[in-house]
Structures are given as C-alpha cells and as structure tokens.
Image: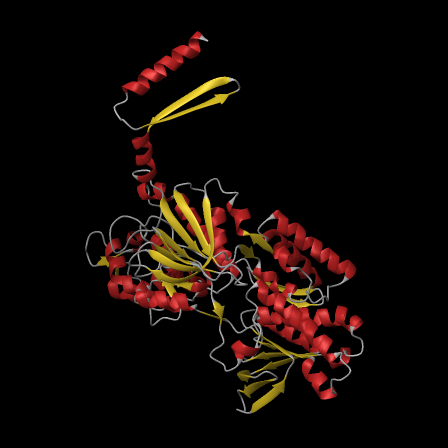
Amino acid sequence: MRGYYTFFERALRAFNDHSTVSKLLVISSVSGGGLLAFSDAKAFQSYAEGDGKKKKVVVLGTGWAGVSFLKNLKSSSYDVHIVSPRNYFAFTPLLPSVTNGTVEGSSIVEPIRNIAKKKPFGVEFKEAECYKIDPAQKKIYCRSTDQGNTLGGNEEFTMDYDVLIVAMGAKSNTFNTPGVEEHAHFLKEIEDAQNIRRSIIDCYERANLPSISEEERKRIMHFVVVGGGPTGVEYAAELHDFAHDDLAKLYPSIKDYLSITLLEAGDHILNMFDSRITKFATEKFVRDGIDVKTGSMVVKVSDKHISTKEIKTGQTVSIPYGMVLWSTGIATRPVIMDFMKQIGQGNRRVLATDEWLRVEGCDGVYALGDCATINQRKVMEDIAVIFSKADKNNSGTLDLKDFKDVVDHISERYPQVQIYMEKKKLKTFDALLKSAQGNDSKQIDIETFKNALHEVDSQMKNLPATAQVAAQQGEYLANCFNRMEQCEKYPEGPMRFRGIGRHRFHPFRYKHFGQFAPLGGEQTAAQLPGDWISVGYSTQWLWYAVYTSKLVSWRTRVLVVSDWLRRSIFGRDSSRI
C-alpha cells in the first residue's frame, strides 16, 4: 500500500507542478485498485487538431473502386468518410443470375458498415447522394436518399474534405434513343435485377390468361436484349435457362410462344473477346433458339414495339416485344459532367486523371473506376527532355550506354513503349534504337531518337470499364495512402523527366487476369492471359471457383454457394416477390 501511495503522491506533485492551467484528470477503479492518468489538455488538443490532425478523406461511392480502397486502406492517419446512396456493396458480375432467381439479390450484397467496422480506425458512412462537387471550396453537396419518402423528405447537407476520392461509377448509355428511359430495363443495380425478375414473371402470368389473343400472347412472350456485350449475352443465356429449365414446367401451355432476340449494332457479339469465343457463342445461341441479329441499330422504343435500322440496307423494322433489356455501355453521370466543366474538362466525355489517378486540373481529388479514365502522357511530348536527361555531357549525341540510366524509367513512365516493343518482337530498348539507326553508327542524335519512338504512342488504349479495373485502382490508391509518409521521404517512382528527383509512387498499371462470358447450359467461355481460350462445361466450374473467391466476404460466399446448391436441387424460384 505504501508503494501505491508513493506513486499517488508523486503523481499529484507532477500534476500540481504542471504549468498549464487546463488539465485532464481521469481516475477509474481497476480490479479493486486504482489507476490515475493525467495529461495537458492543450497538448492533447494540439495533437488532435494541430500537428496530429488527420486529413479528412471523403470517398464518393460504394462500388468496386470505393470498397476496394476501403478494404485495403490500413493507415490510421486519415479521417475517412464515405458518402453513397447505397449502404451496401453489390457484386455486380452476378446481377444476371439475380434476374432469373439463380442467386438471390441479398446474397451478393455486403452492408458497407460490415466492411467499415473491421477497420482498425473509425469510418463514417452517410447514405446520401452527392449532387455537386465544389473543388474551389473543397466541399461536396449531398442530399439524403429516402427511397420511400416516408421520413419527411430529403435532407441536404454539405461536407468539406482534404482529399476527395470520386468513385461514383457511371450510368447506362441510352445514346438519346427515344423511349429507352421510359420503356426499357437496365442492369446496373440490385433493384434493376429484381425488377427484371418481376417483369419476366409478369409476362408469363399475363400471357397465361385465357382472354389474351394469339398475337398478343406472342408479343408478350418476346424478350428483346439490346447490346451484344458480356452483360447482354449473359442475361440472354440466363433467361433462356430460366425459361426452358423451370418456367416451361410451370407454364406448359405457353412455353412454345417464347422467343428471345439479341440485337447488336456491330458485326458480331462479344467484340472484346477472341474471335473463337465469338463464333462459339453465336453458334450456341443459334442452337438454343436465341435469334442473334447483328448490324441492327435501335432507333426508337415504344411501349409495345422496338424500331431498328438495318445498317447494311438502311431498312427500318418494327419489332413487337413484351420486355426489353438495354445493355449498350455506360455514360458519365450529370454530377461528374458538372464537375468536369468546373475544372476545364468540359469538352471531354469522361473525367481525366493522370497515371497516379489524380484528377487533372484539380488538387486533392482522385477519380477511380467507370467515372474516369487515365490520360496517359505521350512519349513524343517529352522526347526532348528525355533525350536531355540521358545526355549528361550535353554533347547532342548519345551512345547506347548513355540510355542505361533512363531506359527503365522510360518503360515505367510510358507503358506504350513496352507494348510497342512486344508488338514488334523487340526484346530490349537497345534493339528498338538500333532498328531506327539504319547503319552501324554507335551514336544516336535527337532525330534518330524521335524516329525510334514516333510510332510508340499509337499503342495507347483506354482501360476497359470493368470491375477488375476499378478494384485494382482502389487497391493501388489505398497502398499509396498507406505509404504516403514513407514515400515522401524516399520516393520510389520513375524519374521526373520534367523536373528533378523521382515521383513519389510507381504509376498505376492494370494487370489483366482474363474475362468470362457465361453462355448458359452450364457452359462458359474464358479468355485468360497468354492467349489461352477455354470454352465448355469445365470452364463453368472455373467460373464458379473464381467468382466465389472474389466475393467480398465469407458471408456472401456461403450465401451464393448455397443459392447455387438450392437451384441445382429445387430449381429457380418463380415467385413474384
């Protein structure tokens, strides 16, 4: 006890001798004993609001990019706030499976607060829609999203930020086609998939009524898919399986009225896949009775008819339908368009960032996923400064040895160089330079250097708007934030050709792991790195394994796998819920 009182007396003397008037005294009982702690309140406040103040990071969106950033962020140096009209993350690759009851909508979503609570630091979430970004004042303007309007209307508020991460995704692109917004279904959200499922059942129930004429029954049972990309193809395949495996048994009298049409404006479906996959998919759809019409551009959608223009003949055809799905790509959201105008990007179709995902023309703002694209810098714009960096003696000519110090930096800063070399089957940068010399001279001047690289920029391509790209961007940016302080002291990026030193981080580089195209009937096509093509039943099991591993939590993995087992045993649910 004497030791305890000695400690207590010393603590009190230290406390009383402290020069600051404002003190923080905390006393609590622990296991029958006592614990006393004290601190200078001003010093504590200084840490929280002064030197130790955390930067406020606001993330807009809970899609692939935003959630990937949140999951991979480990540093507690930031005050993280998330704003999104959805309080969950949806595993969008399985949305077509939700449209026919193979998977339940609730099985592929994970509440965002479940993800946030696992972080070692605090994360604030606001269920609201950001309708304006003010980069000058570093503020965002938001309104609540009371879907049912049961709580007294929408509430509006503003939120300031130090760092803004825009990961709002994109909307469906209608190309301003008349009637699409009013009459077509889209497949971007969970609600879209659930509405499609209800509409399918509605069509079957209405067509089954005895008062419906033969012509009207054919119209109602005609399902049209506009867009021959992965989403449209997978939906058409899922609908075919649902109709033939399940609904045909429940509605035997109208099963022969079913027809499915896939409309594609291009020459073939799945144009981003290898031609072997495209051919296999088209042939399988023909065998399954799915009418694939290529070269058909939709010009108008009414409540009962869809008008198409045949590109080759110019002929306009009116097609009666019962339900239509519109899946023709993405477009920029209005809030992003307004933001782009404020920062001088009004003439662009999508928000532009640099290779580090920083929005061009705006400090402290990053953009990821479908709402942005990387504006890769052209090597020919920097050709003179690259040459001068290598020409340390300012002689005006270089030999191959002079390029050794900069060649790795060139390849990292300008990835199109490596792509060009692979296309030309050139193994080294030296080989690229020698191919431009045309003689045995060991000296290279600026004109020869330009001649070697003048075709390189033709290899630049925009990244696809896929979940795979968005997830990798979110992970990359989180890793940058985790190592921000370290890389400020010890930059790890490539050489600054227009300046001194090095960039803080390596630029973002997308690594393609392949893509799948489910074709129905337990068959899937896969195009994997190395030009490896796989099609058939075995690929379907690979699809099951990959998608299970990519689900965001063990909870969703268990739910989705159980849904697949339920479907294999009991069939798909045809209830209109």
Image quadrant in which you'd find residue 183? bottom right
Image quadrant in which you'd find residue 203? bottom right
From the viewer's perspective, is 354 left or right of 108? left
From the viewer's perspective, is 313 left or right of 134? right
Q: Residue at coordinates 43% horizontally, 64% vertically from top-left?
A: 371
Quadrant in which the C terminus appears = bottom right
At which x and y percent is residue 488?
32, 43
Q: Relative to the observer, which residue lies in front, 430 or 26? A: 26
* Vertical relation: 344 (above or below) 295: above
Q: Residue at coordinates 34% horizontally, 26% vertically from top-left?
A: 39
Does residue 470 appear in the picture of this structure?
A: yes
View extreme (left): residue:
394
Q: Residue at coordinates 34% horizontally, 37% vertically from top-left?
A: 48
Q: Relative to the observer, which residue lies in front, 320 or 42? A: 42
Q: Residue at coordinates 19% horizontally, 56% vertically from top-left?
A: 395
At which x and y percent is residue 458?
38, 69
At which x and y percent is residue 232?
59, 72
Q: Relative to the observer, which residue lies in front, 57 or 371? A: 57
From the viewer's perspective, is 561 left or right of 151? right
